[in-house]
Image (tube, rainbow, N blue to C red):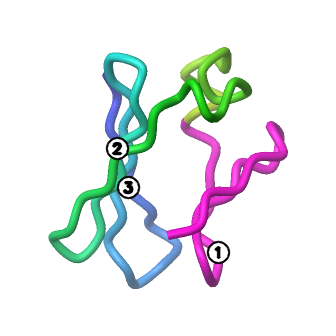
Amino acid sequence: MALFTSRKQKKDIKVSFNNGLLQVESDGKGQVFPLDFYPKLLNATEEEQADWELTGNGIRWNKLDVDILL
């Protein structure tokens, strides 16, 4: 699966989708979220999944109207 990195922020964030999971890596720490909890992300295209931004308290997919707090 594709790996996306935020270039807009100082913080290095890696977001990937694999085997029904959303994997977020930040500052050497990883978090995994089952996509079953986020059906919009589960059913999104790769382009929609790649269109995210880092917010003050998590990640936001504007087109999908999905927020994940980190």
Kind of residue indicated by mark 2: Gln
- Mark pair 2, 1: CA separation: 17 Å
Q: Nearer the viewer, residue 28 or 35?
A: 35
The mark nearer the N terminus, 1 or 3, is 3
The mark nearer the N terminus, 2 or 1, is 2
- Which label number is shown at residue 5? 3
The residue segment tinted magenta is 50-70
- Which label number is shown at residue 23? 2
Q: What is the x, y in percent for residue 7?
A: 44, 67
Neighbour class for label 3 at 10 Å: few (<14), some, many (≥20)? Answer: some
Question: Is residue 40 rendered to the left or right of residue 54?
Answer: right
Question: Is residue 34 rendered to the left or right of residue 2?
Answer: right
- Mark pair 1, 3: CA separation: 14 Å
Closer to us: mark 1 or mark 3? 1
The mark nearer the N terminus, 2 or 3, is 3
Q: Residue at x 49, y 70 (%)?
A: 70
- Mark pair 2, 3: CA separation: 12 Å
Magenta stretch contains residue 63: yes
Closer to us: mark 2 or mark 1? 2
Quarter of the image for residue 46 reads top right
Q: Secondary structure at mark 3?
A: strand
Q: What is the x, y in percent for residue 1?
A: 31, 22
Q: Secondary structure at mark 1?
A: loop
Q: Secondary structure at mark 2?
A: strand
Question: Is residue 6 rendered to the left or right of residue 27?
Answer: right
